[in-house]
Image: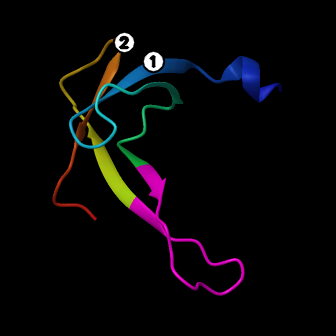
Amino acid sequence: MDLHVATKWETAVLAGGPADGLRMQVAGRPSVLQVTYPCRVESAADGVRVDALYVYRRQLGVNSEPLAYGYDSASP
């Protein structure tokens, strides 16, 4: 079975927070999305990377496209 054919992609939009208005395609209506931004580090060991993490939760009352995800300022 070809997963690309079997997967239903839906448009989603993020509301609030640092990624406000960002639109994307999601499959399977995930309940939580993570957005990361790289941080600058000083004198880090080779290969070390630091990212700021932001959490967006699906708004359950929205059942048609675009799916809506709201910024969760209390997470993680």
Q: Is residue 32 left or right of residue 37?
A: left
Which residue in the rendered view is the most extreme toward the front?
42
Image coordinates of residue 66 in percent, x first then y, are 35, 15
Image coordinates of residue 49 in percent, x first then y, are 58, 72
Q: Nearer the viewer, residue 66 or 20?
A: 20
Where is the N terminus found, in terms of image quarters? top right
Q: Is residue 50 left or right of residue 21?
A: right
Which residue in the rendered view is the most extreme toward the right?
1
Q: How is the image coloured?
A: rainbow
Q: Is residue 76 above or below residue 20?
A: below
Per the picture, the main secondary structure of the magenta-coloured stretch is loop
Residues marked 2 and 1 touching at CB (< 8 Å): yes
Provide the secondary structure element on which disc 2 rests. Answer: loop
Q: Is residue 48 above or below residue 75?
A: below
Provide the secondary structure element on which disc 1 rests. Answer: strand
Q: Amino acid at mark 1?
A: Thr
Q: Which residue is mark 2?
A: 65
Q: Is residue 34 above or below residue 13?
A: below
Q: Which residue is mark 1?
A: 11
Task: Give the total of numbered labels.
Answer: 2
Q: Residue at x 51, y 80 (%)?
A: 42
Q: Tell me the magenta residue range.
A: 35-52
Q: Amino acid at mark 2?
A: Glu
Q: Nearer the viewer, residue 8 or 40?
A: 40
Q: Residue at x 57, y 85 (%)?
A: 43
Image coordinates of residue 20 in percent, x first then y, are 28, 32
Image coordinates of residue 52 in percent, x first then y, are 40, 62
Q: Residue at x 45, y 54 (%)?
A: 37
Q: Nearer the viewer, residue 31 or 76?
A: 76
Question: Does residue 50 show up magenta in the picture?
Answer: yes
CA gap, disc 2 to disc 1?
Answer: 6 Å
